[in-house]
Amino acid sequence: MKPENPILAGLALIAGLLFLSPVLYSIWMSFQTVDAYYAGELGFTLDNYARAVGQYNFARYLLNSLIVSGLVTLLGITFATMAAYAFARYSFRGANLLFAATVATLMIPSHISLIPNYLTLAKIGLLDSYAGLILPAISNGFAAFFLRQYIRGIPKALDEAAYMDGASSLQVLWRIIVPLSRPAIASMALYIFITEWNNYIWPLVAVGKQDLYTLQIGLARLYRINPGEGLIDWPLVMAASTITILPVLLGFLLVERHLVRGITMGAVK
Amino acid sequence: MTMLRKLTPYLFVAPLMIFIALFTYIPILASLNLSFREWNFLTPDMPFVGFRNYEQLLASRDVWNSLWVTTLFTVLSVPLRLGLALMIAAYLVRETMHVRLLRGALFLPSVTSTVSIAVVFSWVFSTDYGMVNAILGTFGLGKVQWLQNPHLALWVLVFVNTWKQIGYDIIIYIAGLQAIPRELYDAAAVDGGKRLHVFRRITMPLVMPTTYFLLVISVIEAFQVFTIVNIMTRGGPAGATDMLVNLLYEIGFVLFDIGRGSALAVLLFILLVGLAILKSRIIGRKVHYEA
């Protein structure tokens, strides 16, 4: 790395903070009392978080988001890895067609399935349930495509050596392919998790019961019902908003480079 | 044993394929079917009505307004995103510590909840206590009704969308720029090329495949914008931000007009798949270009 020019570094820091200032300010605001906020004074409090979590049910929404995004990620990455392995290592009848059908999902806009999926889940009684939130989000063509490209880069000699030792195809997948694809699998799991965490339109139509709201729905409703009388209770709304972005924000700080790598590999290749 | 061996790959792809079929492909056919029917959830049967839903849509001012607003949003936001992103990426392509930090800051919004961003910017642009009007106030300027003014609301959405997505564009551009061979720049330096000249004659043409990619991706994305509309304006004021997916949501899930909602979904689908096919042509050209 080249030595730093301190002036440039300082300017870059200021530019970054300015760019993020709306979000940074919203976090700051979430620690202000509503009276102090409207009076333009300072008044530190944790009460907004206490109210968001207690009175406005955000602890439950956080739990729902974790359950839904967690299960979607777990099932999504498992199915994508299995399919990617078959596409990368087996030649079988219909493989090209099935792979094309997988890749084509990248071009299919999700809004087309909104009404039919709603009707399907209504018919089998899964609206207003975790299953209803999770099932339509599990298949991820992009992850399967991405992982297939990655697995093809792993030397086939490794598989063959394992088969010689009497391993089954499941063992080859689990003992050789999965460990060697860890960075790619991690990138895709993260991508699936973030996408599902931030998903809005599907939970908006699929869930009516308050106990099943995800954070996104909870936050949108809280903002819409305007809990302040006349004036919006912005500090409370911002506390809820901070709860909504925090898990992804923390994850981002930990694994930014994985994420960036995954995104650029997918787009440029 | 051989039977089982032949079956193995099918067992591996089956779970993914079943879910793709159930929740992606069958719904396309179902939408097509529903678009020729009349149904509102309440009546016991759904009669076939031919092209009536399509005729009604094409005769509806809301639909044409929506198409116009969505096109306008796209035409305003896509060049803004790509132009800014390329300029910023050209600076951020180097590897120093402060550049890394700045890249991280710019990228952050693209993985942040759109609902949160929409709520935060509803405050930023709110008339009485918002951040923008407060800043304008310190310069002695009056309050502006950003989200209540039909001439301004769409611009605000363009701004918020750009703010959220530009980090993604920048990251992709940086990857594209890093693929340009260094020797070209060295040669230009020997010839005494001015910076702007080098940018126009070397950087812009060689990063063209990346630009094409981002162009089509962002156009498709712009045509599907929903969350910021739903939270910040609900399509208002007076339909000024009523973009296509918002209209689809209103027809399907507020008015519960399943037939007309499905017909609109099919029309938008045809439009977007057309664009996507254009994109795959372009990516085909890119491969050619590199070889």
Image (cartoon, rainbow, N blue to C red):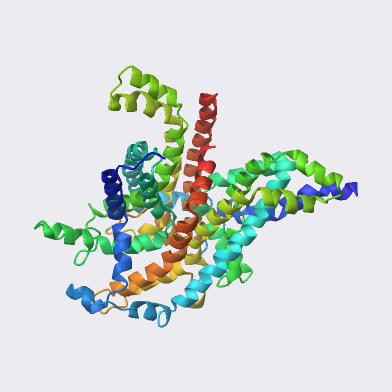
Q: Residue furthest right?
A: B1
Left or right of residue B1: residue B180 = left
Residue B122 in the image: state x and y as whole percent.
Answer: 29, 62
Q: Viewer-proximal residue, B57 or A164? A: A164
Residue A101 in the image: state x and y as whole percent.
Answer: 64, 44
Q: Residue furthest top?
A: B191
Q: Classify residue A88 by image quadrant.
A: top right
In percent of the image, x 26 and y 61: which residue is there?
B124
Residue A1, placed above or below residue B110: above
In percent of the image, x 27 and y 64: which residue is there?
B123
Residue A4, placed above or below residue A140: above
In percent of the image, x 35 and y 48: which residue is there?
B102
Residue A74, placed above or below residue B195: below
Where is the C terminus of chain B found, in terms of image quarters?
top right
Residue A175 in the image: state x and y as whole percent.
Answer: 74, 53
Left or right of residue B77: residue A70 = right
Q: Residue furthest bottom?
A: A55
Residue B204, placed above or below residue A210: above
Q: Classify residue A20 by image quadrant.
A: bottom left
Residue B12 in the image: state x and y as whole percent.
Answer: 74, 51
Left or right of residue A160: residue A193 = left
Visible in this render: residue A67?
Answer: yes
